[in-house]
Amino acid sequence: MRIAMILALSAALAGCVTSPVDYGAKLSQQDPKWASPECQQARIAASDYDVREKEHPGWGFGVLLGPYSMGMVAAVKEHEQQQRRLLARQVHLQCSSQPLPKELDFDPATYAPTKTQYP
């Protein structure tokens, strides 16, 4: 139980990643890439994700299942942050001619699921 609490607290204190919709709104609309179909698709995907993220139970889910679910809630929050970073990165690449900012300059393969070999 102590480990679950530590995981939950570390996920909460890790900081929230900006919503891809909010990040896209900060980009310059004068950029030539802004009006491209690829940018429109990236903004739609970010908006769809934002709606889906608000529909799921979030932290209330952990309250319903008790203290043993804190690790699961922390894992869900970490996954959400990864998805937000990936979508914000995609929005930037499709909608801006500027170089990637430091917080979005990472290898997307680091978030790819790894194939587990079972005996």
Image (spheres, rainbow, N blue to C red):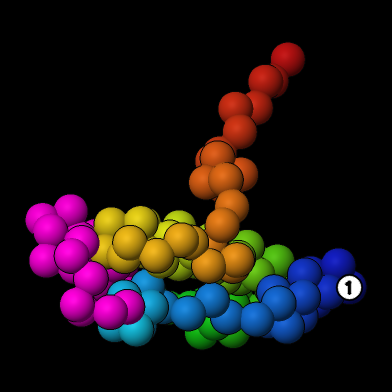
How many tags in the picture? 1
Residue 46 in magenta stretch: yes
Residue closest to the eye, 81 or 69: 81
The spot of residue 45 in percent (x, y) is 24, 61
Residue closest to the eye, 71 or 100: 100
Identify residue for label 1. Answer: 2
Question: As shown in the figure, which amino acid type bears the numbered disc 1?
Answer: Arg
Left or right, residue 61 beside residue 67: left
> Mark 1 packing: few (<14 Cα in 10 Å), some, or many (20+)?
few
Left or right, residue 56 beside residue 110: left
The residue shown at (12%, 59%) is 36
Q: Which residues are magenta?
A: 27-51
Residue 95 in magenta stretch: no
The residue shown at (59%, 67%) is 103
In the picture, the quarter occupied by the C terminus is top right
The residue shown at (35%, 56%) is 93
Q: Quadrant of residue 88?
A: bottom left
The spot of residue 72 in percent (x, y) is 63, 64
The residue positioned farthest toward the top in the image shown: 119
Can residue 67 be seen at all in this image of the molecule? no
- Secondary structure that dominates the magenta span: helix
The spot of residue 78 in percent (x, y) is 60, 65
Q: Quadrant of residue 97?
A: bottom left
The spot of residue 117 in percent (x, y) is 67, 20
The residue shown at (61%, 33%) is 114
Q: Secondary structure at mark 1?
A: helix
